[in-house]
Image: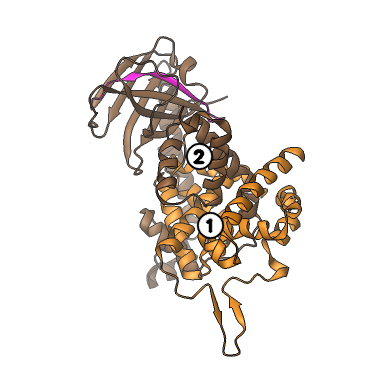
Chain colours: A orange, B brown
Amino acid sequence: MDDRLDVERLLSRIGLRDAVAFKSLYTLVSPRLMAVAYRVVQDRALAEDVLQEVFIRVWNESMPRPPGQPKTWAWLCVATRNRAIDVIRTKKPETPLSWLDNNGDEHFHDVEDDAHSPLAELLAHEDGQRLGQCMKRLESEPRQALLLAFYDGLTHPQIASRMQRPLGTIKAWTRRSMLRLKDCMEDTV
Amino acid sequence: MKWYQHPSVIDRLAASYVLGTLQGGARRRFESVMYSQLAVAAAVASWTEQMSPLLTTLTSIAPSQALWTSISSKAGIEQPIAAPKASWWQQWLAPIFAPLPAGALALGVALGVVTPALWQAQTLSQRQAVLPESYVGVLATPEGKTGLTVSSLRQGKIVELQQTKVVTLPAEKILYLWRIDKAGQVTPVAAIPNEKWGRITLAEPAEAVFFSAVELAVSMEPIGSTPSKPSQAFIYRGLCGKFWKWM
């Protein structure tokens, strides 16, 4: 995002209770944060609830932040995702993760449209190309496990259930994939 | 040896935390350590930055128009008020007296602003009419409420402290002030009194102590200790402002 520095500057101004900066930040980032929240909760109204809470917390300076973690665009995105995951984890699933239709065909709740997969969007975006290239180097199933955890907030047992793989395999996939991603990102700096 | 003393374990757990696979009690324990151990926090920040393109590159979705209204209302921010519609007689007189407000404004400016300014320039030239150059920190509680203000003259050594509410300190603990620089580096400043109005004297001028600070924070530390890093989560944290003109 080219406005990264603007976001940091606005977040600093908001710390001084600058309402104009708050409105500017909202205008600048709300469509992108809406995409982040929606990607996780898959429900427009719920995503707006998440966004509302995130912005109120930003205004009140009560967004959880580890010591030394600067207020950056990345931090704001991940904080929004975390809040969205908290929301779906406290809600009981209203639709099953997978189900059979009348013809006996199995359907999954979160089947991706290939044209708009996270990987495709990553690679299409300048900011995400490095991570996208590294993600591409992962094998298909471990990458899918990683994305289910990151985007959908699924736990290891839920991913195991979804992918019909042993829990130990899923844990190993996600752990190794993160390490491989890190190595790859460092190599491509 | 504790797990957070092993860099490889820190990195693995930070990755799981950012990925979202650290669950329940493990997640809570990790978070409590993260708020007190800078190495853990730094690993989380690093993973946050590395994984963020997965989120920042998603295709935007416009929220509804009503969302901002709701947010600004809940945040207590006033919406711009629409100008009241002119009454029938104001509308009728407007074309006749349209040129008048410009002249009236000019006269108002001359009488209300320029004259006092000239008067001040003549009679108060020796008086300092601006706020002295100062550092001011407004620190909030983890709940987002203002908890402590910290202020000092730029070249002074006295730091004034005002707590909204005196905290209940566990036995053998004191409050300790920290500065946080642009890179997130946390540096100890001094122990501070747990009083509604307090004051400390710095060993060197505030300029030397606070210049690099973008934030200030306060933690609870063991009495008599000289900590090099916070031993537990901050109880106050907020921006440190520099109140002077740069040019």
**Residue at label 2?**
A12
Is disc 2 surrounded by few (<14), some (14 to 19) or many (20+) residues within 10 Å? some
Left or right, B127 with respect to B106, comes to: left
Res A156 label: 1
Question: Which x, y percent locates residue A185?
Answer: 71, 42
What whole-number distance in Å separates the C-alpha atoms at marks 2 and 1? 37 Å
Location of residue B217 with respect to B206 vertically, above or below: below
Mark 2 or mark 1: name the one nearer the start of the chain.
Answer: 2
Dot 2: element: helix
Q: Which residue is at 74% across, 49% downward?
A: A134
Question: Which x, y percent locates residue B60?
Answer: 62, 62
| Residue B9 seen in the figure | yes
Which chain does tag 2 point to? A
Which kind of residue does numbered mark 1 sit on? His
Q: Do circles 2 and 1 both sit on a common chain?
A: yes
Q: Which residue is at 54% across, 66% downward?
A: A161
Is disc 1 surrounded by few (<14), some (14 to 19) or many (20+) residues within 10 Å? many
| Residue B130 seen in the figure | no
For residue B66: magenta? no
Q: Which residues are magenta?
A: B182-195
Which kind of residue does numbered mark 2 sit on? Ser
